[in-house]
Image (tube, grey):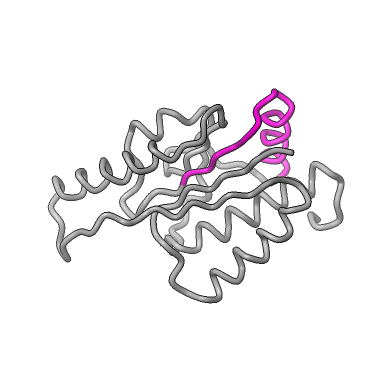
Amino acid sequence: MLTVTLICIGKLKEKYLRDACGEYGKRLGSFCKLNILELSEYKLSDNPSESEIQRCIQKEGASILAKLPKDSFVIPLCVEGKQYASPALAKEIEKISLSGQSGITFIIGGSYGLSDEVKNLGKLRLSMSEMTFPHQLARVMLLEQVYRCFQINSNGKYHK
């Protein structure tokens, strides 16, 4: 069974977001082994300088790199990434799983993004949208799309 790991900077603060992630986690249990790793946010001042922001991105990047599963296909979420329609993303996930990879790791960075070192590990970079969403909503949206991809690949009725 494929292992899907989600590495996220920050904890979900709102109960409704935790509940939504929990629901998709349960649904994904039929298709994969799901691991969600929440890493601490680097604390910044109220009005951080560019050098503070860069230090934050590097520190968070180092904590992400330390937790990356070995031999996993890495997919960072970043604005420079490619946007996919759900069926196209499903095909990408199917190709990855059929290529012999034992796992896929999605990475959601902090509010200032991911370090270049983390992004460069991505064989596929994913952008969710050109629109701006609350940072914590990204996790729910990603889990829903991963679930949708598994449903598409198994000819399930969820995707219409």
Q: Quadrant of the N terminus?
A: top right
Q: Which residues are magenta?
A: 87-107
Q: Nearer the viewer, residue 38 or 95?
A: 38
Residue drawn at the location 53% of the way across and 31% of the way down: 124
- Location of residue 31 with respect to 19 vertically, above or below: above
Q: Nearer the viewer, residue 133 or 111?
A: 111
Pinpoint residue 21: horizontal percent, then vertical percent: 60, 63
Furthest-top residue in this view: 99
Q: Is residue 96 magenta?
A: yes
Q: Quadrant of the C terminus?
A: bottom right
Q: Is residue 46 magenta?
A: no
Residue drawn at the location 39% of the way across and 42% of the way down: 64
- Location of residue 140 with respect to 112 vertically, above or below: below
Q: Nearer the viewer, residue 106 or 72?
A: 72
Pinpoint residue 120: horizontal percent, then vertical percent: 40, 28
Question: Residue 102 lies in what quarter of the image?
Answer: top right
Pinpoint residue 118: horizontal percent, then vertical percent: 39, 35
Residue drawn at the location 14% of the way across and 45% of the way down: 51
Q: Is residue 102 left or right of residue 42?
A: right
Furthest-bottom residue in this view: 15
Q: Is residue 113 left or right of residue 8?
A: left
Residue drawn at the location 62% of the way across and 35% of the way down: 103
Pinpoint residue 113: horizontal percent, then vertical percent: 35, 47
Q: Is residue 144 left or right of residue 7?
A: right
Looking at the rendered structure, the number of numbered marks drawn on it comes to: 0
Q: Is residue 73 left or right of residue 28?
A: left
